[in-house]
Amino acid sequence: MNQVSAVRGIETDEDSIMATFTDLALELRLPELDWDFLREHDGVIVKGRPRTTADLAACLSWARFLGMSPVYTDASGNCDCWLGVNGPWVLEIFAEVR
């Protein structure tokens, strides 16, 4: 294998996270969320949002499965944001559609 081929085979953190979350969505029978990645201070911030308003309920299921904590609750008592830390990754899930 030449060096160019070896470099192409390297999986990024983002690729690994996306593959894991895609597998989890299938396994848990949850709608996939849209995930954004930000690199900050040698870590990765991963932000997830539902694709449609019909998928809002999936945010809580994702957050529970990933062991995330609620960090923002609106006036009606519904949680709209969860936060979790897993090694160098910070995970955030927002219950809002762009």
Image (cartoon, rainbow, N blue to C red):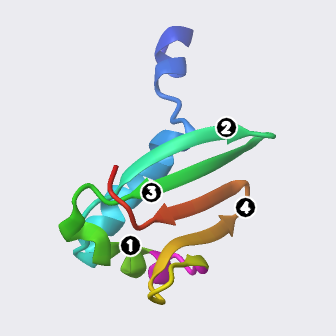
Mark found first going from the N terminus, 3 or 2 = 2
Q: Are marks 3 and 4 in contact (CB under 8 Å)?
A: no
- Gap between marks 3 and 4 measured at Cα: 18 Å
Instruction: Residue type at mark 3: give it.
Output: Gly
Residue placed at 39% from the left, 57% from the top? 49
Describe the element under mark 1 as helix, strand or loop: helix
Residue placed at 57% from the left, 81% from the top? 67
Q: Is residue 26 above or below residue 88?
A: below
User: Which residue is disc 2 drawn over?
Assistant: 39
- Gap between marks 3 and 2 measured at Cα: 15 Å
Residue placed at 42% from the left, 49% from the top? 35
Left/right of residue 2 with respect to residue 30 in the rendered view = right
User: Which residue is disc 4 drawn over?
Assistant: 87
Could you tell me residue 91's position as x and y percent? 59, 61
Describe the element under mark 2 as helix, strand or loop: strand
Mark found first going from the N terminus, 4 or 2 = 2
Q: Is residue 36 above or below residue 77?
A: above
Left/right of residue 51 with respect to residue 81 in the rendered view = left
User: Which residue is disc 1 drawn over?
Assistant: 59
- What span is colored magenta in the figure? 63-70
| Residue 73 appears in the rendering | yes
> Based on the displayed image, in which of its 4 quarters is residue 7 positioned?
top right
> Based on the displayed image, in which of its 4 quarters is residue 48 positioned?
bottom left
Mark found first going from the N terminus, 3 or 4 = 3
User: Which residue is disc 3 drawn over?
Assistant: 48
